[in-house]
Image: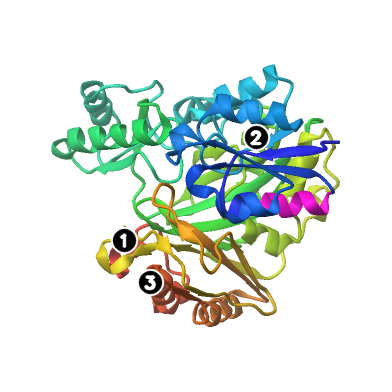
Amino acid sequence: MIKKILIANRGEIAVRIIRACREMEIETVAVYSEADAKSLHTQLADEALCIGPSPSVQSYLNMQQIISATLITGADAIHPGFGFLSENSRFAKLCEECNITFIGANSEILNKLGNKSEARNTMLAAGVPVIPGTKDPVYDVHHGEKEAERIGYPVMIKAALGGGGKGMRTAFSADEFAFAFQTAQKESSMAFGDDTMYIEHLVEHPRHIEFQILADIKGNIVHLGERDCSIQRNHQKVIEEAPCEAISEKLRRRMGDTAIRAAKAVHYVSAGTIEFLLDKNDQFYFMEMNTRIQVEHPVTEMVTGMDLIKEQIKIASGKVLSISQKNINIFGHAIECRINAESPDKNFRPSPGTIRTLYLPGGCGIRMDTAIYSGYSVPPYYDSMIAKLIVHGQNRKEAIAKMISALGEVIVEGIDTNVDYLYQILNESDYQAGRADIEYLNTHLQ
């Protein structure tokens, strides 16, 4: 069994992992940048080491520093959380070479699935429905233009090693392609240190549906139902739900079986997520596989009663799944809202600064995952998400009412947040009626 885990991340996910480790009686090591010296995760872990200056490329993306910190502290495993190095095959390979357990997929699987273009080809070979697109990597705009013409407009341009909505742009015509491609490629280089792109046909007005899976070293794979992640702004998720109201039980079984088939195609081991686009005719297409814990994993935990971080650690320790598909039950409805330090009325400009006053809601079926506290200074160097508010109700109507009530109690003074914006969405009639696709925020709340 793993005895000591170094957490190669920050913020609420680092705190979330520390809490799971405490319950499993596993020691924890926090690493932090100079900007995060007073962060909550550094105070909750058993040990904490500074690994570099504030910019993430010099700290949370610094592989050598993280490996050195692991060896110095005697940790036998690294949990990468999400973002940063969580899907980096080179980092996973370094862990393997240093005999450190990487809590996630191995480097071979990450090579197959971390590159979104390769993943598409793997799924095609496995008979998983895939959106028409490029089979080979695209590095320059002229090659991209030819591929876009072949695929047919509108097209989506994506970072091959991307995630979190970064390195993505849409082109509806040839006139828009060059600017969209160059912008997405530049963003990909800055966010992931890689400028490899791929292009696929744009499925208009779909829902974004993802299935959570768990897979052990013995080849046992289960899915834990779906999450509806259709409420997005600039391809970044804002609100997530489980289950999806628009999916019938028959379609759920079909999509779940396909998700398991996709995981089996790459001999997947660990927790992972198969992401689909679902059109209005109930046709679904594989979009990508995320080989890490997701930001929105709490909604699945709320409707299944399972701790996904603990399951990740158990799988990495070599344990087989303790549950089969027939024993997985989905109960009630869960919603997650991402609370960001940003100003929606100023084009969502990030709002770093010091939190003077903080009040967080509570009550039956209400969960807040966060690392902020009164007096905490939100740094300007990282993602603007500062908290996740999650609620669980007997049904969707109750969950919405509970989220509206909980959002109304949130007080964060000293910085701007998107709480009022989230409150607006939850009160929209179309949202409440379940009529939301990934274009919802573009058509309802400018």
Can you tell which quarter of the image residue 373 is in? bottom right
Residue 33's label in the rendered image is: none
Q: Considering only vertical position in the picture, is 279 above or below 146?
A: below
- Check disc 1: other Cα within 10 Å, few if <14, some if 14-19, many if 20+: some
The residue under label 2 is: 263
Give the mark toward the camera: 2 or 1: 1
Work out whether residue 187 or residue 198 is closer to the camera in this orientation and state it.
187
The kind of secondary structure element at disc 1 is: loop
Q: Residue at x 66, y 58 (%)?
A: 300
Quadrant location of the C terminus in the rendered image: bottom left
- Residue type, mark 2 in image: Ala
- Residue type, mark 3 in image: Tyr
The residue under label 1 is: 348
- Magenta stretch encompasses residue 21: yes
- Of mark 1 and mark 3, the one earlier in the sequence is 1
- Magenta stretch encompasses residue 408: no
Please name the colour scheme applied to the rendered image: rainbow
Q: Residue at x 37, y 29 (%)?
A: 198
Give the mark toward the camera: 3 or 2: 3
- Check disc 3: other Cα within 10 Å, few if <14, some if 14-19, many if 20+: some
Work out whether residue 245 or residue 335 is closer to the camera in this orientation and state it.
335
Work out whether residue 386 or residue 125 is closer to the camera in this orientation and state it.
386
Q: CA distance from mark 2 to mark 1?
A: 36 Å
- Of mark 2 and mark 1, the one earlier in the sequence is 2
Viewer can see residue 284? no
The residue under label 3 is: 421
Q: Position of residue 109 (x, y in %)?
A: 62, 26
- Residue type, mark 1 in image: Phe
Q: Which residues are magenta?
A: 16-24
